[in-house]
Amino acid sequence: MEEKINNEEKVDIDEYYVKYHYYADGGVHFCGFNITYLNSVTSNSNPAVNTITHQAKSKTVENEIICGPFKKGDKASIEMSNESSVVNRLLEICVSKNNSPFALRKNTNSSKVEYTIDY
């Protein structure tokens, strides 16, 4: 994306998109949980937060969500909460800069992961 400054120069502005990947396994039980993630950051630096609720209807749940655009320095985060019968979990944050392929930046098997976009 390009932005004009004083109607003369064009400056390239990097755009970043975030792909959140999450996986939950309830073992022999059905698992339920909430996923909360940052969808984007508004022009006044306020994060837009979304929550998805997965009811206990299956033993494993896996999904990906792509959000953005973000800017360098913005924080991406995903959290799993209100867990019911979750035995194993995986949370990942992947980032794409200017339509490049998504690259894994951070992952965890705990309930929350954050990443500050820094490249």
Image (cartoon, rainbow, N blue to C red):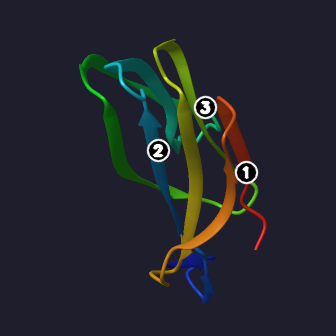
| Residue that lies at the very extreme toward the left in this rendered image | 57
Q: CA distance from mark 3 to mark 2?
A: 24 Å
Secondary structure beneath disc 2?
strand
Whole-percent x, y for residue 1 in the image: 48, 78
Disc with the residue nearer the chain's start (3 vs 2): 2
Per the image, label 3 sits on a secondary structure element best described as loop
Q: Is residue 53 found left or right of 19 in the rendered image?
A: left
For disc 1, the neighbor class at 10 Å (few under 14, some 14 to 19, many from 20) is some
Indicate left or right for 53 with 113 as reference: left
Q: Residue visible at 49% across and 84% down?
A: 100
> Badge 2: few (under 14), some or many (20 or more) residues near its Cα, within 10 Å?
many
Q: Which mark is residue 115?
A: 1
Q: Position of residue 13 (x, y in %)?
A: 60, 76
Neighbor class of circle 3 (other Cα within 10 Å; few <14, some 14-19, many 20+) is: few
Which of label 3 and label 2 is nearer to you? 2
Height in image: 17 above or below 36?
Answer: below
Residue drawn at 37 percent across, 50 percent down: 65
For label 2, the residue is: 22
- Residue at x-position 63% and y-position 76%: 6
Q: Which amino acid type corresponds to the residue marked 3 in the rendered image?
A: Asn
**Residue located at (61% from left, 31% from top):** 46
Query: Which numbered marker is on residue 107?
Result: none
Query: Considering only order in the chain, which callout, 3 or 1, is on the residue closer to the N terminus?
Result: 3
Give the residue at mark 3. 46
Front position among marks 1 and 2: 2
* Percent position of residue 96, x then y: 53, 73
Q: Amino acid at mark 2?
A: Tyr
| Foreground label between 1 and 3 | 1
Pick the residue in front: 33 or 28. 28
From what the image shows, is residue 105 above or below residue 5?
Answer: above
